[in-house]
């Protein structure tokens, strides 16, 4: 996504842009599945594109302003976090099938677990985890309020056992979602807030609004969860 209302799609292996799609509106969030890409825009609209840039479906005049978005890996489901404190769940055809409540502020970030069974959501200081396979029943709701500012990044470990959260407070917290309140905290990881994170086998890579990229060796800290 680019600030001048253009969706640009690139191929990782070739490192080349394969499509540039004028959106005609300001994008607010995006979620990518295996075959499709959901774009949520600030004009309260949703658009679904394939990875070649062709428009598949769209919805207009949403009752809320989108803040975050996520796509299930199988493209069967999409979630959009709103300024109305709700998670809006959509089927593959972009029909809204349910809303999920549990946040005290706008839902700022969403992330499906790699195995597709869980959805993590971040909002006004709290992190929630939902069971996707059981009607979005709450796994952890309101029990992880350990950030002091809104959540800006979430990342699942590849085996879906651990979750990392980062916030505008600059802190990173590692969670074992199966053990309530079991966590490891990295204070002041980024001076101006955490922008994104990704897991490796033994490392967690984080980027921040301070323009820095940090690599954390989390091997010993993960052992603490056992």
Image (spheres, grey):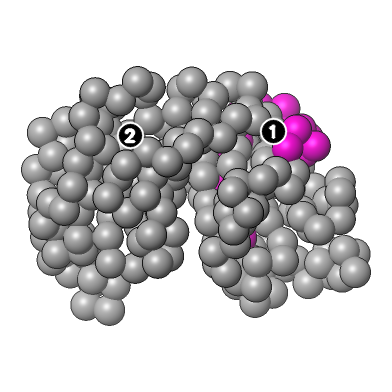
Which numbered tag is attached to residue 178? none
The structure residue drawn at horizontal position 23% and vertical position 71%, both measured from the top left corner, is: 11
Q: Earlier in the sequence, mark 1 or mark 2?
A: 2
Image coordinates of residue 118 in percent, x first then y, are 61, 56
Q: In this orientation, which residue lies closer to the viewer: 139 or 150?
A: 139
Give the number of marks: 2
Residue 5's image quarter?
A: top left
Q: Secondary structure at mark 2?
A: strand
Where does residue 119 sit, x and y in percent of width and height?
58, 51
Dot 1 falls on a residue whose secondary structure is: loop
Where is residue 42 shown, x and y percent of the image? 28, 26
The residue wearing badge 2 is 28
Q: Nearer the viewer, residue 102 or 105?
A: 102
**The C terminus is located in which quarter?**
bottom right
- The magenta-colored residue range is 141-156
| Depth check, front residue: 8 or 100 | 100
The image quadrant of residue 160 is bottom right
Dominant SS type (magenta): strand
Task: Decide if residue 218 is on the left or right side of residue 225.
Answer: left
Residue at (46, 22) in percent of width and height: 83
Q: Which residue is mark 1?
A: 126
Q: Is residue 144 highlighted in magenta?
A: yes
Q: Is 203 left or right of 71, judged from the image as shown?
A: right
Looking at the image, residue 59 lies above or below residue 155:
above
């Amino acid at each position: 996504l680019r600030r001048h209302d253009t969706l640009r799609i690139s191929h990782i292996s070739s490192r080349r842009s394969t499509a540039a799609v004028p959106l005609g509106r300001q994008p607010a969030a995006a979620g990518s599945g295996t075959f499709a890409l959901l774009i949520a825009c600030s004009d309260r609209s949703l658009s679904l594109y394939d990875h070649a840039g062709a428009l598949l479906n769209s919805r207009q005049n949403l009752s809320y302003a989108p803040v975050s978005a996520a796509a299930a890996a199988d493209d069967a489901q999409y979630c959009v976090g709103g300024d109305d404190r709700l998670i809006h769940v959509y089927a593959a055809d972009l029909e809204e099938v349910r809303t999920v409540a549990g946040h005290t502020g706008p839902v700022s970030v969403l992330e499906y677990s790699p195995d597709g069974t869980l959805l993590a959501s971040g909002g006004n200081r709290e992190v929630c985890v939902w069971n996707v396979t059981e009607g979005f029943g709450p796994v952890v709701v309101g029990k992880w309020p350990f950030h002091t500012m809104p959540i800006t990044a979430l990342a699942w470990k590849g085996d879906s056992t651990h979750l990392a959260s980062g916030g505008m407070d600059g802190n990173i917290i590692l969670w074992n979602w199966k053990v309530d309140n079991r966590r490891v905290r990295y204070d002041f990881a980024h001076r101006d807030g955490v922008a994104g994170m990704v897991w490796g086998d033994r490392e967690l890579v984080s980027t921040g609004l301070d323009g820095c990229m940090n690599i954390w060796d989390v091997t010993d800290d993960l052992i603490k969860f056992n």
